[in-house]
Amino acid sequence: MNVSNNSNLECEFHICIRHVMRMSRWVGFFPVSGLNKSSINELRCKTRSFCYIFNILLIVAHFLISCLSFYHFSIKLELENFTKFIFYSTGFLSVVSFSVLARKWPRILRGMAKLEQSFAPMRTQKSNPSKFVIYSYAIMLLALIEHILSINYKLTFIMNCMKERSINNDVLIRYVQVYVTQIFQLTTFSLWKGAVYKVVNLQATFMWTYLDVFIMCVGIYLSNLFRDINKTISVQEAQNSVKWSSIRQHYSQVMKLLKQANKNLSFLILLSFFTNIYYVCLQMYYSIQSVDGIEYNAYYIFSLLFLLLRSFMTSMMAVQVNTEALKPLTVLRNIQTQDYTLDVQRFIRQIQYCNPALSGICFSVTKQMLFSAIATVVTYEVVLLQNSRTRAMLYDGLNNLRTRYEHDFQTQQDAFKGASSMLIIAGYTIGLNPVSGALGKDVSKIRSESKSMKHIYSIILCLFQMLITLLCIMNIFKKNISVTTLANVIFYGTTFVTSFLFLRLARKWQVICQEVTSSRLDEYIDPRIQFKCTLATILMFTMALFEHVLSIISQFAHITDCVTKTDVFKTYIEIYFDWISFLNLPNNGVLSVFVMFLNIICTLNWNYSHLFIICISLYLSSVLEQINKKLRSSEGQFLPSSFWKKLREDYSSATRLVRIFDNYINTIIFVAFASNLFFVCLQLFYILSLFNSYEYIIYMFTSIMFIMGRSLFVALIASKVHSATQVAAPILYAVPSPVYCIEVQRFIEQVHGESVALTGMNFFQVTRDLVLSVAGTIVTYELVLLQFT
């Protein structure tokens, strides 16, 4: 590219969407300058600019309002308070996401501009910027009308209650007192605080709608690119001279743009679809309430219709990308035999296996997904009807810390030892993975010796956990069965099973290390793998201990409030460890301390299995990601078949290593995921009970956030193994035709022919789709719990 082109680099996407992005800059969400210029060379995100500082202040304000809304909801469990928390928390996440996107925006557009220039000669028609502007401003105008109707309804309600005929100072004060309750529960009343809250409220309302507008624009742009390819195919088909090789290359470049969009916008898409589904259900629920007043009916009918229209447009414009991308298949499948070339075959496979659709992290936006969302809305609406009565400094610091702990490992065995070293040491302290020589360099010296102190210590703890589990089962027969007694059985039973599984795994640890050594993947080493696993270990154990300490504090607070006995510690043991009564032992200080020690060991044991899955997944995905990195570096190059043969064999060795690890740890994965499902539902059930104290409130919400966060983190990290195996296909499809050989074809068939992922006893594969299924299961169980409550 010459200098003149660089001085005035243009991007079609930027030209189409720049006026839309300026709206977000005006309100402080997108601190990027140069949006008024057609050239992308002047785009800047300056950290010392007024817009950036204002953006940081907005993030802080939204965060504070979200925290206040959460506190207000924890004090008073009502649908309205929960809705406010969802509204402001999603607004806060959206503001943070757009702020992060702003920092990457100039670089993203420069990459898009280069891709656009690569297929510019094959374009027949460019996107019309006016279409983007009209859609955006029309939707935002309707959102403004909806918000005005909301304010009008609330003011009219206040005036009717106060029997006032006009808006005056008393009406405004009362309006603030009624609708800004979450602030004035913690601070004194004043109008200026209400005004600040209203500004944040307006911005959150703007962001709620703007997020959908932004996704609409992205969908329109990408679908136009695929539509242009379909038009080219139609024109050339009419002339009986379809150049499938150039069309396939054009399609591959557009797929790269789609991949970039998914990489940077998938969280925003997830956030948009989640909020739309929630608020459609909510507005349908509110719309059926029998409330008098023209203002109320006008607002809720308009709001529901506008929300349905906006959600439908967002979904359809996102779905249109997948619809247009699949259209060439119809033509390709009807090609005559004499015209069926290698490029046609590659084109068909690329469309079938590369999933050309916008993604929301754990789902693809397709027509099937849209129908599922509609079914979800209908299902949740029935449930509602049935129950109608009832980052800059932090990033630099982390980057410096990560660089400091990079290691230049020579072999895969060294990398695996580095990844598992902190894990092994942590396991020793709680009686798990009693392996001798695991931290040494010689694999042949790794042993699980039955007479070693580590092994004896592990067996003793395992036996105590089995004893406690049996005592908890006896406690169920002694008392009436309850959620608490059942939870104790599940908790201690899970820790006992986990200890037993790690005792069995210790005997196979030498075999696993030998397989790592013999994999011959020494060139695919991530130098930061030890840092990642060490950081995960420290964070997991720190958060687990913090959650356990909060649990103990809340329990002692309950005892001091409700029990008049002077020996609080003895009473604590009798109430929360009542299974100890079966031992007929005197409740003295030694026994109490020992029971507390066993409880802490069981808590860390429960978390260790999740940490183990995370570290193993990080290691396996790092090997696959290093292979993908080498694959990306070869993109577009004319390389011999020997290169592809070597890369395919390395990929086979890596996937074989995944299956070997899965063979030994799939039972641990199954137990971890099953316990997560149970305890998330359990904590959600406990949240519905009456809160006794502030300590209990803080503990319950911290606990549920920790367990849900841990469950999600484990699932997403483990699913990275499967995701890493899917990266190769789009790159292989883009291999230049002159060097496309049997090894590339075998590589493609191997990627698509086998599903490589960690499993739970082979009952399920840990993929991103599983995350969505588990979330749906949790929601279903919670609805059942709500009905019984």
Image (cartoon, rainbow, N blue to C red):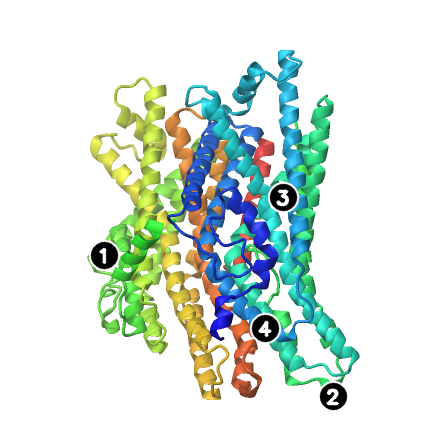
Q: Which mark is residue 454?
A: 1
Query: From what the image shows, is residue 655 above or below residue 782?
Result: below
Q: Residues within 10 Å of mark 4 (few under 14, many from 20)?
A: many
Quadrant of the snapshot with the C terminus: top right
- Marks 4/1: CA distance? 56 Å
* Residue situated in front as seen by the camera: 6 or 497: 6
- Label 3 sits on a secondary structure element that is helix
Residue picked out by circle 4: 252
Q: Secondary structure at mark 1?
A: helix
Q: Kindly identify the residue that appears in the image at 53 percent across and 38 percent down.
A: 203
Looking at the image, residue 440 lies above or below residue 49: below
Q: Determine whether, in the image, residue 215 is placed left or right of residue 264.
A: right
Q: Position of residue 72 (x, y in %)?
A: 48, 28
Q: What residue is drawn where x is 45% and y is 39%?
A: 58
User: Residue tagged by mark 3?
Assistant: 277
* Left/right of residue 556 with respect to residue 273 in the rendered view: left
- Kind of residue sitting beneath label 2: Gln
> Label 1 is placed on what type of residue?
Lys
Mark 2 lies on residue: 338
Q: Earlier in the sequence, mark 4 or mark 3?
A: 4
State the CA–CA distance, disc 4 to disc 2.
Answer: 24 Å
Q: CA distance from mark 3 to mark 2?
A: 49 Å
Q: Is residue 448 visible?
A: yes
Question: In front: mark 4 or mark 2?
Answer: 4
> Is tag 1's residue or tag 2's residue first in the polypeptide sequence?
2
| Amino acid type indicated by mark 4 | Ser
| Element type where label 2 sits in the image | helix
Residue 501 in percent (x, y) is at 37, 57
**Image depth: mark 1 or mark 2 in front:** 2
Q: Earlier in the sequence, mark 4 or mark 1?
A: 4
**Comparing labels 4 and 3, the label whose residue is closer to the camera:** 4
